[in-house]
Image (cartoon, rainbow, N blue to C red):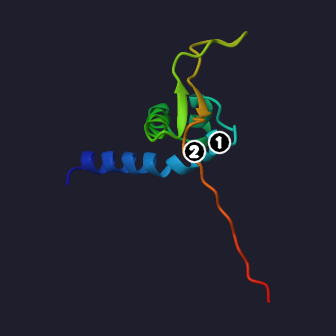
Amino acid sequence: MNGKATTTRTKLERGRSALGPALELVHTGRAPTRAVLTSELGVTRATAGAVAAELEALGLIRVDSSPGSAAGSQGRPSHRLSVLETGPVVLAAQVHADG
């Protein structure tokens, strides 16, 4: 195998392993934008964009690609991320037996 295929696979694996942490960051509100997601995950902008796009394709989050710019901000505004209200719901319970 050449080094390029191995590098590509590693990048894909890195992106896939970031899906869970990225979803948690969006759900808790700690990553309201793709720029914050990039910083929090410690990945490249391209990887954060791919992770956000995959979560959106799965119907878990919404990526607003045309956000309004905040007052006093410089540069191009980052894509806003939010939980998709119509996405799946999970209910978990931990049951203990007494006795």
Q: Check if mark 2's residue and mark 1's residue have beta carbons within 8 Å.
A: yes
**Neighbourhood count class around disc 2 (C-alpha, 10 Å): few under 14, some 14–19, many 20 upward:** many
Horizontal and vertical percent for residue 12?
A: 37, 46
* Residue name at image x 45 percent, y 41 percent: 58
In the image, farthest residue toward the left: 1
Between 47 and 51, the one nearer to me in the picture: 51
Amino acid type of the residue that numbered disc 2 sits on in the rendered structure: Leu
Q: Secondary structure at mark 1?
A: helix
Q: Secondary structure at mark 2?
A: helix
Horizontal and vertical percent for residue 21?
A: 58, 49
Instruction: For marks 2 and 1, give the CA distance.
Output: 6 Å
Quadrant where the N terminus lies? Answer: bottom left
**Neighbourhood count class around disc 1 (C-alpha, 10 Å): few under 14, some 14–19, many 20 upward:** some
The residue pinned by badge 1 equals: 27
The residue pinned by badge 2 equals: 23
Between 51 and 35, the one nearer to me in the picture: 51
Horizontal and vertical percent for residue 81?
A: 59, 30
Relative to 15, 31 lies left or right: right
Relative to 25, 19 lies left or right: left
Relative to 98, 15 lies left or right: left
Quadrant where the C terminus lies? Answer: bottom right
The correct choice, above or below, for 85 with respect to 79 in the image is: below
Image quarter for residue 30?
top right
Horizontal and vertical percent for residue 49?
A: 47, 32
